Image (cartoon, rainbow, N blue to C red):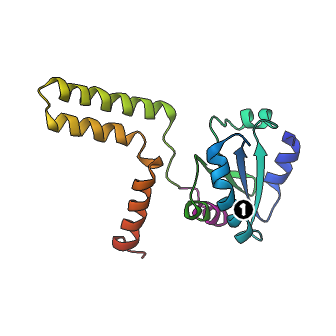
Amino acid sequence: MNIPALDKILKAPGKSVVLEFWAPWCGPCRSMAPFLEKTEEDFKDRVNLVRLNVDENQKIARSMKIIAIPSMIAYKDGKELFRKTGAQSGDSLRSFFSDAVEGVTTRRKEISPISRIFRFLAGMIVFGLGIQNNFNWFLILAGGLLAFWAFYDRCPIYNAFSSWFKSKFVSQG
């Protein structure tokens, strides 16, 4: 696919568009594929899914600042709404497509790679200080939490627990 053809798809009125950047050698892309196919089928009347193999569409991937795969970008009426990087569960994909249909622009922001590195390094420094200070458990715990803060959004246990917590305790008002 070329950039002008993609621009035409993105700017077409009507359906929302979800771009998925993937590669056949990408394990997370392959594991997400069945969920994506099911979600595409469920939203076929409302969302146009465009799957772009990054090996075959390197110019487009660079122009859209894709730095990791799988990556998905939602568009409505030619405007980028939001993007998500990393493998998604079936529920997460349904939420992504639903938000694209509704034109939602305020999704949880992705943590930048630089921010992840700083958070992780800060956690390891505090953790190390805890070890050096006669196993100060407070510092060890604080360091562990700081390091976890760098990757919490990709932790399947955290995501499952937070989804369950929200469904039980947060009002759906």
Q: Looking at the rendering, which quadrant does residue 123 occupy?
A: top left
Residue 159 higher or lower than 66, as above or below: below
Q: Which quadrant does the C terminus fall into? A: bottom left
Residue placed under numbered mark 1 in the picture: 37
Q: What residue is rendered at 71% in x and 38% in y?
A: 64
Secondary structure beneath disc 1? helix
Give the left or right position of residue 43, taking residue 105 as reference. right
Classified by dominant secondary structure, the portion drawn in magenta counts as helix
Q: Looking at the rendering, which quadrant does residue 58 occupy?
A: top right
Residue 55 higher or lower than 82, as above or below: above
Q: Residue furthest left?
A: 134
Give the extent of the magenta segment.
95-106
- Residue 161 counted in the magenta span: no
Q: What residue is rendered at 58% in x and 54% in y?
A: 88
Q: Which quadrant does the N terminus fall into? A: top right
Where is residue 83 drawn, in percent x and y? 61, 48
- Residue 102 counted in the magenta span: yes
Q: What residue is rendered at 71% in x and 49% in y?
A: 20
Where is residue 65 drawn, in percent x and y? 67, 35
Where is residue 164 drawn, in percent x and y? 40, 67
Give the left or right position of residue 103, taking residue 129 as reference. right
